[in-house]
């Protein structure tokens, strides 16, 4: 459920008409709902009730400071994968002991940043990384809690570009090597192994792959404990999918996911961490664009929008489906027609949907891309020198721009001309 609904014939974000935001901010833009973010965070938190746990929002999904503040205010931890994300989490007021540092290529500088500012744990992804973290932490005279991300060789049955739990993927340490790796950690200064980490992929639409992975983690927990390691925390990653197509069967709910965790891992008495990103932010945001032209082609009509692949890359990159709905509610029973929905970028890949059935639309009409809150704004670029589009946050009847659209001058002035190009030729 989200808070983008038609009221009196037009789309609202909570209590605010989308058309009102569009008039103030201009299109295209992203708009997020505080109520939906809150609801989704709480669904996870409640699903794990009764087990010690922390929901660490995977902020790669949407990392605007205002969004982080909403979630941090509810008690969320953060899963970060770069020094930049760590700095963003800290800037939003998240205490270090609620920040989990994931990612397969952490640099020494990133490690130092988090060790200085405080960190809940590092999730180690390789043996070379383990050695470097030991050296950096010991050099700073600290001992840092760590988990090892194990690769359970489980098929997440999701899009190949976002599956991470098979042995051919670059992530984690093969689970068969885990005991040897934990033994090495025990012998290294600066590291204390406190748990196990696993993340098998994103946009999972069934629970079975999670079950397979978590059963392997349960077994490994027992083995490592028998080896003398005090395994007391399990980081189970993110990955629960969202319903991108309203007409399709919905993925499992956080309550079902929580029940699975309890069933497979509850008896171990570990503190549970999860790292959901998409399910918290995805349906908490929509992208609004305006129809610039309707162009009749051969055997098809194109809806040319002012939003493009640089603003929302998921369809071009993953062939992803986003429901696209008109901001003015279509009259009941109105006949729909197929459109190819495209942006203005100079690539044929800049296509959001082909032969999508829509009510008749004309230049000036607004459309909303549903499910755009996660991996939308964060993956945007300024390709074609198109300014990054604004982000807006709604809270009941209020709205605020939480990232303004840069001006052309701001964009251009980021470039610096080397002196030899400035000097007049003599
Ligand atoms: N934890 C780790 C270690 C991850 O790599 C990810 C996502 C998450 C948590 C959060 O997963 P989620 O709950 O959001 O599924 N750009 C792609 C998605 C990439 C996901 C990368 N890792 C997309 O637009 O579909």
Image (cartoon, rainbow, N blue to C red):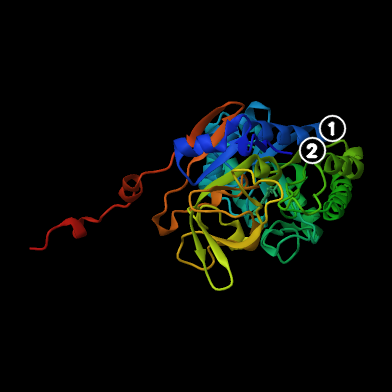
Q: Position of residue 17 (x, y in %)?
A: 57, 34
> From this viewpoint, which residue is outermost toward the left?
426
Element at badge 2? strand
Residue 67 is situated, as x and y percent measured from the top left of the image, at 59, 35
* Residue in the foreground of this view, choosing between 100 and 188: 100
Q: Are marks 1 and 2 in contact (CB under 8 Å)?
A: yes
Along the viewing direction, whichever of 220 and 87 lies nearer the viewer: 87
Q: Is residue 413 visible?
A: yes
Q: Residue at x 75, y 64 (%)?
A: 167
Query: Is residue 59 visible from the viewing direction of this image?
Result: no
365 left or right of 128 in image: left
Residue for badge 2: 272
Indicate the secondary structure of the residue bearing disc 1: loop
How many labels were placed on the picture? 2
Residue displayed at 67% across by 43% down: 283
Is ligand 1 less than 8 Å from the beta carbon at label 1?
A: no
Which quadrant holds the N terminus? Answer: top right
Quadrant of the drawing holding the C terminus: bottom left
Q: Nearer the viewer, residue 307 or 8?
A: 8
Question: Badge 1 is on which residue?
Answer: 51
Q: Position of residue 50 (x, y in %)?
A: 86, 30
Q: CA gap, disc 1 to disc 2?
A: 7 Å
Q: Residue furthest bottom?
A: 298
Tag 1: Cα neighbours inside 10 Å, few (<14), some, or many (≥20)? some
Q: Earlier in the sequence, mark 1 or mark 2?
A: 1
Relative vertical location of residue 336 with respect to residue 6 in this rendering, above or below: below
Q: Quadrant of residue 268?
A: top right
């Amino acid at each position: 459920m989200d808070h983008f609904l038609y009221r009196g014939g037009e789309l609202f974000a909570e209590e605010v008409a989308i058309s009102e935001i569009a008039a103030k901010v201009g299109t295209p833009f992203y708009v997020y709902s505080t109520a939906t973010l809150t609801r989704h965070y709480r669904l996870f938190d409640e699903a794990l009730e009764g087990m010690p746990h922390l929901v660490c929002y995977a902020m790669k999904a949407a990392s605007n400071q205002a969004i982080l503040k909403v979630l941090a205010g509810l008690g969320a931890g953060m899963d970060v994968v770069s020094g930049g994300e760590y700095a963003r989490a800290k800037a939003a007021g998240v205490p270090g002991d609620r920040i989990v540092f994931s990612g397969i290529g952490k640099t020494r500088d990133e490690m130092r940043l988090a060790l200085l500012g405080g960190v809940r744990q590092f999730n180690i992804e390789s043996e070379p990384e383990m050695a470097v973290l030991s050296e950096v932490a010991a050099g700073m005279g600290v001992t840092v809690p760590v988990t090892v991300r194990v690769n359970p060789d489980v098929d997440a049955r999701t899009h190949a570009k976002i599956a991470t739990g098979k042995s051919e993927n670059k992530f984690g340490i093969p689970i068969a090597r885990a005991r040897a790796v934990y033994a090495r950690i025990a012998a290294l200064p600066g590291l204390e192994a406190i748990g196990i980490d696993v993340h098998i992929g994103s946009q999972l639409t069934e629970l079975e792959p999670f079950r397979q992975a978590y059963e392997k983690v349960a077994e490994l927990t027992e083995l490592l404990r028998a080896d003398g390691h005090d395994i007391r925390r399990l980081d189970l990653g993110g990955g629960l999918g969202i319903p991108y197509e309203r007409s399709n069967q919905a993925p499992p709910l956080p309550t079902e996911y929580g029940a699975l965790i309890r069933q497979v891992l509850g008896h171990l008495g570990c503190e549970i961490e999860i790292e959901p990103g998409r399910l918290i932010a995805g349906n908490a945001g929509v992208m609004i664009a305006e129809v610039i032209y309707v162009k009749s082609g051969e055997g098809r009509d194109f809806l040319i929008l002012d939003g493009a692949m640089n603003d929302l890359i998921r369809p071009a990159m993953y062939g992803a489906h986003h429901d696209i709905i008109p901001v003015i509610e279509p009259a009941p029973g109105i006949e729909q027609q197929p459109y190819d929905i495209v942006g203005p970028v100079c690539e044929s890949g800049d296509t959001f949907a082909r032969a999508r059935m829509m009510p008749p639309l004309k230049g000036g009409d607004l459309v909303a891309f549903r499910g755009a809150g996660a991996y939308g704004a964060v993956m945007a670029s300024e390709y074609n020198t198109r300014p990054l589009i604004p982000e807006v946050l709604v809270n009941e009847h209020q709205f605020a721009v939480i990232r303004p659209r840069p001006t052309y001058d701001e964009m251009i002035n980021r470039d610096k001309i080397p002196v030899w190009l400035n000097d007049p030729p003599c």
